[in-house]
Amino acid sequence: MMPDVDDFEEHRPMLLGLAYRLLGSMWDAEDVVQEAWLRWQATDHDEIREPRAFLVTVVSRLALDQLRSARVKREAYTGPWLPEPVDTAEAGPLDTAELRDTVSYATLHMMERLSPPERAVFVLREAFELPYDEIAAIVGASVANARQLHHRASVRLAEGRDRFSPSSEEHAELLATFMRAAGGGDLAALTELLHEDVVSYNDGGGKVRAALRPVIGRDKVVAFLRGLVARYDFRGVRMLEVNGLPAAMTEVGGHRQLVMLDIRDGRISAIYGVLNPDKLAHVHVG
């Protein structure tokens, strides 16, 4: 007996959210979910006891395989590789704090530090609350090893994070203040907003001119922003919600740029500027 189409469609948003968290790319996530659909169609329904568990396993393993090959491509990427941002509405269910945290842009970026198995175990445990025995079976590890992978991932992701995240309103206010100060060239205000260890990441992908290396430290970031303001016009700032948090779309030198922030100790600890047009397809300005 063939599987019911409705069973798959019921789980599609969750599966897209899972694949996106594992890959940091909605394009790749959609490919993985499409491949999972083909496998679902080709499988005898009588052999599937739990459709959700079956599909989570298939998507996770497909994403793991793709992530291993993607890491090689990302190492050869022109400039810093940043995850592909998505409208919050496209990020899948966000019913829990863990689902929201693991889809936040800063978390996706930091998950690039993890090995593929660490990332899979962390996402499956934190976001989807799977028991360790199921996670171990998915990633091909022992239960003890799965626990160890989760611990390692948690420790690595906790480094430099703020235990107390600002509210969405506080985040939006800090972002708006930053955009006004940057666009107006107010260096004193910028300096006050930035954490001393702030890092600016700019992803042009070789298609739009952007810094080829992260800019590290408050003084260097202020100087970098001062140079941008002197060289380019910043136009039409629009606020929107991306990956569960406020973001700003603006135009810099005729190219769209999405700006997102990470905040630590009440100051901006990371600035993410996505200019590669291929990565802005899932961000819609109303």
Image (cartoon, rainbow, N blue to C red):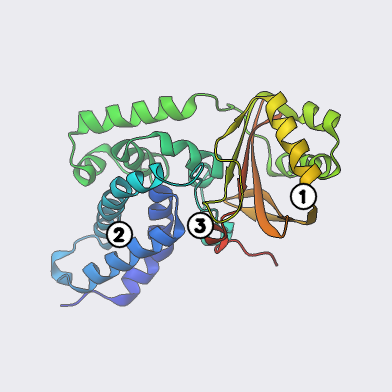
Residue matched to label 2: 52
Which of discs 1 and 2 lies nearer the camera? The answer is 1
Disc ID at residue 232:
1
Give whichever of 268, 209 is nearer the camera: 209
- At a point 36% along the width and 39% down the height, the residue shown is 119
Q: Specify the amino acid type for callout 3.
A: Ala
Give whichever of 27, 207 is nearer the camera: 207
Q: Is residue 280 left or right of residue 102?
A: right
Q: Secondary structure at mark 2?
A: helix
User: Badge 1, how many Cα within 10 Å: few under 14, some, many 20+?
Assistant: few
Q: Measured along the vertical axis of the image, is residue 188 above or below residue 2?
A: above
How far from the left and from the top, in percent, is residue 141?
18, 37
Q: Measured along the vertical axis of the image, is residue 245 above or below residue 238?
A: above
User: Badge 2, how many Cα within 10 Å: few under 14, some, many 20+?
Assistant: some
User: Badge 3, how many Cα within 10 Å: few under 14, some, many 20+?
Assistant: many
Q: Specify the amino acid type for callout 2.
A: Arg
| On-image quarter of the N terminus | bottom left
Q: Secondary structure at mark 1?
A: loop
- At a point 34% along the width and 75% down the height, the residue shown is 6
> Mark 1 or 2 closer to N-term?
2
Residue matched to label 3: 91
